[in-house]
Amino acid sequence: MNPAGLSALRSLSRAMFLGFVRDRGALIFTIAIPVLFLVLFGSIYKGSSSPRVTVIEVGRVTLLDQAEAAAPGQLGKILTISRAASLAAALSDVRQGNSDAAVQQRGGQLVVHYSIADQTTAGVVQSVFSSIVDQANQAAAGGTAAYQLQTAQVEDRSLKPIQYLAPGLLGWAIASGAAFGSAITLVSWRKDKLLRRLRLAPVGTAAIVLARVGVSVVIALVQLAVFLAIATTPYFGLKLTASWWMAIPVVICGTLAFMAIGLLVGSFAKTQQAATSIANLIILPMAFLGGAFIPLDFAPAWIRDVSYALPLRYLVTGMQDVMARGEGPAAALPAIGILLGLAALLSLVSVRVFRWDDV
Amino acid sequence: MLATISVRDLRKSYGRLAAVDGISFDVQPGEFFAILGPNGAGKTTTLEIIEGLRQADGGEVTVLGQPPWPRNPALLPRIGVQLQASSFFERLTAREQIRTFASLYGVGTARADEMLDTVGLTEQAQTRAEKLSGGQAQRLSIACALVHDPELVFLDEPTGALDPQARRNLWDLLRQINAGGRTVVLTTHHMDEAETLCDRVAIMDRGQILQSGPPAALVRGLDSPTRISVESGLLDAAQAAALAGQAGGGPGDVTDDGVSLTIATREPAPVLAGLAGHGALAGLRVSGATLEDVFLTLTGREYRA
């Protein structure tokens, strides 16, 4: 591009960027709401990955001491133990759901009171205490257990909900920011006849498109930075894995892909409202089915199957793999390839259906 | 001298509708030219083809000696186009708008600010375009069209929705632009605008140019009567009819609506002399035909207003 083209590119970018930062609605939509979702979901699901069980020790339970002595520190990983003087107070606590179980030892008998309000926790309570009793029995019989079961989760121990929440919500934020940005710009510029005005100025289409792409990419990188800044605070505890920087090209390619979707929407929509509705119709279901709102690991099989057809899946999982799952930089390459391919394909279609004018 | 714009047998159809149906005209350098016509006459399509926004179906167009289609980047810096008062970047101030447009043409900020001053918007420099009044927005959009100092300026309905005061202010600005030596082409459906501003007008309807020429010549060519009116009650009906008769007319040329007595005549001199003789000149008004009359005669009064 010649120097005149560069200066046009610079001033168009500046005009679009100012137009964006002065648009309170756009700022709320692209930054504030996604951040709010992150804070909300991050707080709700904080620490829910390791099922800890809170137990009230009523009186003295020597079996617990024995178990602790046998394997120091292990019990604390599963149980949080508090003490209560009376059984009645402890039971009321359990009934209200403040604690998961109350445990009492009467000589050789271990009595565990639990609620089945939460069946998973009830199951954990039962199995934990039966294994404690089993071990105690073996110790009493003077033998050492020939076999011991050790359980280990397959995911990295640090895979807390924030590790998939942050990339998921970020993927949704970037996808909608990019799609809405390009769709609405195209529709309103066409409606206001700004497109034809620009066509009458000695600037190439490339400068106009590049300016819009540049602004969208900057916005997406700001979204990434804000998300990372918030999610990595100790409160939310996102731990970035080694190749997290690979998320940057994933974000850029995702922005291109979703801008292309927006461009196509903007080519057909006649009004801003129509563009917003159509873009919502595309992005929102994708957010639920493509792993942004519902992590694919926990989603029903049919959602996982559907997700392969949704571009948002590749943006979200591409970021997750390198940011949170600790995979190498190459893990993001398939996602990058698919997103770029989609961007190219949709842009080609958009060029064919592009209209400078409403008529 | 080479015409600034030359149009020969231009045609453009949308489906079966012939929006522009074989028109020809020239615009000379420095001329203030108007295409006049009702909505749907084909004015805007004609302008769009000349500007290079649309491809003609047939005919020949050259602008500053070059064909405008396909998009001709060599031509673009030499022409300035004002589209609509709303063709701005969203949420940018007046100054930011004009500076952005200036930079698209490689024009510096000093010249942009100067242009803002020329159209009298220095005080509104910090105002966002969407907050400007209709007249201010219109002036800003003209400033944006002129910022690169084009030789040829196109204005599409520049005073469209303005109040009379704002229109007059804008007319002054348009005269200034033309006085600077630029060729100005405007479309309008306001007769008074074309009559006040233009050297030459082309009257267009249903895709064809019905007539073109200097406004005064068109009006004269119409050979319509001059209307002379004075206050009612200064003359009785018989005296008025006698005056009309002296000028070669009849009693049918006299009307009195209780406020004004009007005599329509092709020989105004004896009527005026007669009125003076009766001492009945209070509230005297003499009006000739206007471009509006030309337009109505050409397009048919009973079909369109």
Image (cartoon, rainbow, N blue to C red):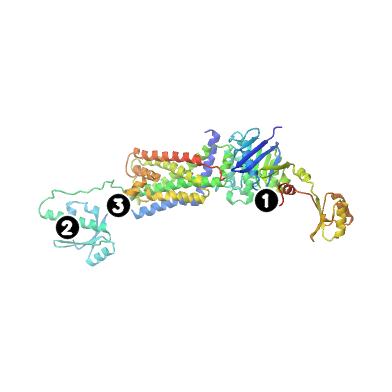
Marks 2 and 3: CB-CB under 8 Å? no
- Which numbered disc covers residue B4? none
Give the residue furthest to the bottom.
A88
Q: Which chain carries label 3?
A: A
The vertical placement of B207 against A74, above or below, is: above
In whole angstroms, how far apart are the C-alphas of marks 2 and 1?
94 Å
Q: Mark 1 lies on which chain?
A: B
Q: From the image, tell me which residue sits under label 2.
A: A63
Give the residue furthest to the front.
B16
In whole angstroms, how far apart are the C-alphas of marks 2 and 3?
27 Å
Of the two numbered discs 2 and 3 on the same chain, state the one appearing first in sequence. 3
Asked if labels 3 and 1 share a chain, the reply is no
Q: Is mark 1 on a helix, strand or loop?
A: helix
Q: Can residue B283 be seen in this view?
A: no
Residue A268 shown left or right of residue A312 in the figure: right
Q: What residue type is labelled 1?
A: Ala
Q: From the image, tell me which residue sits under label 3.
A: A49
